[in-house]
Image (cartoon, rainbow, N blue to C red):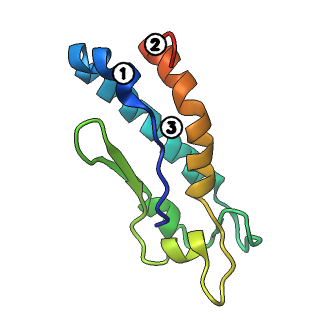
Amino acid sequence: MADSKVVLDDKKLQSIIRNEPQRVQDWLDGFTIDLLSRIVLSFGTSPSSPGEPPGVDTGALRASMHWEHDGNLRNTISDGVEYGLHLEDGTESIDPRPFMAPAFADAQQRIGPDARQHLGLEDL
């Protein structure tokens, strides 16, 4: 899998993290589930064009997508097939068909407003 991250400056969240950590984790879990859904829904029909998310052939990649808690207030989304990274980044003989990076880029834009709305943060 490509090494993409969604980063949120948690300094502005410190108060709510201290006072309501479960509320923050619940929000993060919901954001993660939404992000995973967007990734899965991005898969098109096979064959896909280079630069577009992969097309569904057997459905194994799409079915293997999952998320898990990876520490305190940290979730990880990954695929469970060996070829996911090859599709995401491409190889010498396969042009990239990114499915994670575009979703993470979109999430980077949405995470602040989403946190503000769901956690009631004024200046995030």
Determine the CA span between mark 1 and mark 2.
8 Å
Where residue 29 appears, x then y in whole percent? 37, 34
Distance from the alpha carbon under mark 3 to that under mark 1: 21 Å
Quadrant in the picture for residue 89:
bottom right
Left or right of 47 in this view: 28: left
| Res 52 label | none
Q: Is residue 117 above or below residue 70?
A: above
Q: Is residue 114 left or right of residue 24?
A: right
Q: Which residue appears at 52% of the width and 31% of the height?
A: 111
Nearer to the camera, 15 or 62: 15
Return the residue at label 1: 13
- For marks 3 and 2, give the CA distance: 20 Å
Q: Which residue is mark 2?
A: 121
Q: Earlier in the sequence, mark 1 or mark 2?
A: 1
View extreme (right): residue? 49
**Label 3 vs 1, first from the N-terminus:** 1
For mark 3, give the secondary structure: helix
Image x and y of residue 46, in percent: 70, 71
For mark 1, give the secondary structure: helix
Q: What amino acid is at disc 3?
A: Asp
| Residue at 43%, 39% in the rendered image | 32
User: Which disc number belongs to residue 34?
Assistant: 3
